[in-house]
Image: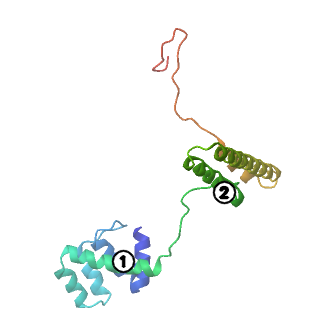
Amino acid sequence: MYIKSVNILHKLTGNKCLMRALLAFFGCPGPRLCPIEICLFIYSKNNLGEALAEDLKTLSVQSSFDKFIQVYSEACARFVPVKRTKRDKKPPWLKPDVKKAIRSKIASWDVYINSGKDESAYREYKKARNFAKNLINKKIYEFEAQIASEAKSNPKILFSYVKSKQVVKDQIRLILTKDGTALTDMQ
């Protein structure tokens, strides 16, 4: 985070040395943490003027931190791209038609519950449930058949799918002897 912050703030001010000093002054972890005297020395070597050095001397810690946060927020807003991340990993066979069938099943269940558990509403729910279940099984089968057909040319997809389906149990199970006692150490 330290290097990214230096690079982002460097784009804003055009002075990477100043940004390293600012980050060090505010206690951000980095390769070297500079005390305030070194920061002021860096400011003077970069011809930043006496005003900035005086500001750092006269401002309280809280106001200095607030000033830094303001500059940092502006830099982040200007130079850090916003990237949306996926919240959950959906199965590759989950297509829009499957989603529609699942939504239909849920909606028919809601109708059944809201109707006071009417028999005709339950029959409609059963139809929607069975259709969704069969469609899901069909899509999974088609997806696995596609992976199997492409396995020779692209084995990475096959092995990643197989690995995702494996259940690995890391813990060592309890070992019982013939007389029913549990082993606690290597015997």
At x 47% / y 76%, what residue is drawn? 80
In the foreground, 69 or 127: 127
- Taking 174 as reference, is 24 above or below it? below
Q: Quadrant of residue 16?
A: bottom left
- Which residue is denoted by mark 1 in the rendering? 72
- Taking 58 as reference, is 110 above or below it? above
- Taking 52 as reference, is 83 above or below it? above
On screen, residue 1 versus residue 95, left or right, reads: left
* Amino acid residing under circle 2: Lys
Quadrant where the N terminus is found in the figure: bottom left
* Amino acid residing under circle 1: Tyr
On screen, residue 30 versus residue 101, left or right, reads: left
Label 2: which secondary element = helix
On screen, residue 95 versus residue 52, left or right, reads: right
- Taking 68 as reference, is 33 above or below it? above
Earlier-in-chain disc, 1 versus 2: 1
On screen, residue 126 versus residue 67, left or right, reads: right
In the foreground, 121 or 147: 121
Distance in Å between CA atoms under marks 1 and 2: 43 Å
In the foreground, 52 or 98: 98
Label 1: which secondary element = helix
**Residue 21, which numbered label?**
none
Residue sitting farthest toward the top: 179
At x 71% / y 45%, what residue is drawn? 130
Q: Is residue 21 visible from the viewing direction of this image?
A: no
**Residue 99, which numbered label?**
2
Q: Quadrant of residue 10?
A: bottom left
Mark 1 is surrounded, within 10 Å at the Cα level, by few (under 14), some (14 to 19) or many (20 or more) other residues, namely some
Q: Position of residue 8 (x, y in %)?
A: 43, 78
Q: Where is residue 105 in the image (x, y as percent from the top left)?
A: 65, 51
